[in-house]
Image (cartoon, grey):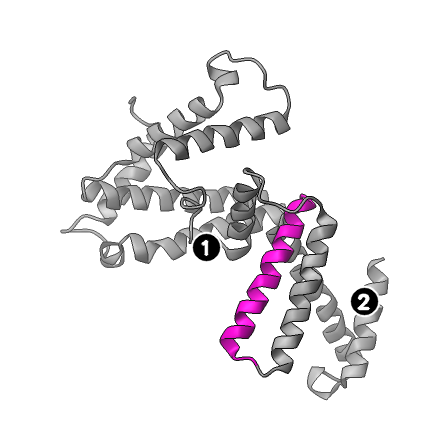
């Protein structure tokens, strides 16, 4: 491969210096794949947060932090003679060309984003088949649970294992909710209640998929709405010379409804 741009080369050199056994940073020298993985996930979420806030200067910084995670993992791999950063770039470059034959190989037939999604999934299916994987084996276990649920469901749906309508999923959600109530009434253990709640959340993720809604994005929006309305309660109580500790539930509920009406 050709040499990476100067800015990338400089970043790779910084990473080598940080991991130098003689003169490197003690903290960086202590790290391994497992210890760095949580930071990688955190940086990806911070990228998503900057996008959600439309904070473009922050997005530039967060993308840099995420890129550094790729460089860090690549350096760890290079030290173990597994692969180097150039191999990571080469692998994704080859994959993008392989999965976009209509762009790079002159293949016709891909005219819409939906058609591209279908073709993309078909390419991935063939790649999985070549590796002799089970259909669900390569859905990463480390994904956020809602994201993984949707990916598992989409994979199963690709072979026809799926509800035929969103309304059927809503019925399943009601069924799962009833089972939680029944389990609690029967004095079920915490483990059993966790299992039943997991089934309910899995069904909710399935509904999101059928509605073509990103459940993570939907929940982030709901979180933001909750924070916004709760802040209204705090602010209003403070203006009245009181606070949350001294307010009754009825007072807080009335202010919640007030905040809700103001958003309409």
Displayed quadrant of residue 200:
bottom right
Residue 156 in the image: x percent, y percent?
53, 44
Kindly report the distance in space between the C-alpha atoms of the residues bearing marks 2 and 1: 32 Å
Q: Residue furthest bottom?
A: 246
| Closer to the camera in the image, 150 or 214 | 150
Within-10-Å neighbours for mark 1: few <14, some 14–19, many 20+: few
Q: Is residue 240 visible?
A: no
> Tag 2, which secondary structure?
helix
Displayed quadrant of residue 176:
bottom right
Q: Residue furthest left?
A: 22
Q: Quadrant of the C terminus?
A: bottom right
User: Circle 2 is placed at which residue position?
Assistant: 259
**Residue found 38% across the figure and 25% down from its top:** 94
**Residue found 61% across the figure and 54% down from its top:** 205
Residue 131 in the image: x percent, y percent?
34, 35
Nearer the N terminus, badge 2 or badge 1? Answer: 1
> Tag 1, which secondary structure?
helix
Residue 17 in the image: x percent, y percent?
23, 45
User: Circle 1 is placed at which residue position?
Assistant: 42
Magenta part of the chain: 188-212
Q: Does residue 181 show up magenta in the picture?
A: no
Q: Is residue 163 visible?
A: yes
Within-10-Å neighbours for mark 2: few <14, some 14–19, many 20+: some
Magenta segment main secondary structure:
helix
**Residue found 65% across the figure and 47% down from its top:** 163
Q: Quadrant of the N terminus?
A: top left
Q: Does residue 198 show up magenta in the picture?
A: yes
151 displayed left or right of 164: left
């Amino acid at each position: 491969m050709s040499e990476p741009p100067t800015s990338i080369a400089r970043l790779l050199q910084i990473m080598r210096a940080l991991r130098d056994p003689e003169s490197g940073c003690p903290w960086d020298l202590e790290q391994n794949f497992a210890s760095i993985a949580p930071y990688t996930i955190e940086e990806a979420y911070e990228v998503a947060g900057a996008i959600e806030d439309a904070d473009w200067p922050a997005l530039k910084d967060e993308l840099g932090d995420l890129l550094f995670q790729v460089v860090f993992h690549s350096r760890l791999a290079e030290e173990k003679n597994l692969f180097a950063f150039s191999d990571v770039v080469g692998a994704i470059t080859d994959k993008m060309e392989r999965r976009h034959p209509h762009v790079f190989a002159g293949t016709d037939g891909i005219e819409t984003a939906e058609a591209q999604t279908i073709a993309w999934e078909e390419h991935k299916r063939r790649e999985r088949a070549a590796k002799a994987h089970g259909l669900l084996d390569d859905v990463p276990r480390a994904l956020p649970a809602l994201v993984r649920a949707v990916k598992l469901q989409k994979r199963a749906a690709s072979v026809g294992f799926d509800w035929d309508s969103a309304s059927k999923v809503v019925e399943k959600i009601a069924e799962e909710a009833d089972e939680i109530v029944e389990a609690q009434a029967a004095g079920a253990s915490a483990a059993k209640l966790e299992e039943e709640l997991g089934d309910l959340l899995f069904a909710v993720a399935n509904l999101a998929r059928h509605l073509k809604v990103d459940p993570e994005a939907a929940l982030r929006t709901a979180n933001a709405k909750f924070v916004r309305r709760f802040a209204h309660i705090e602010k209003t109580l403070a203006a009245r010379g009181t606070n949350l500790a001294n307010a009754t539930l009825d007072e807080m509920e009335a202010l919640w409804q007030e905040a809700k009406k103001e958003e309409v």
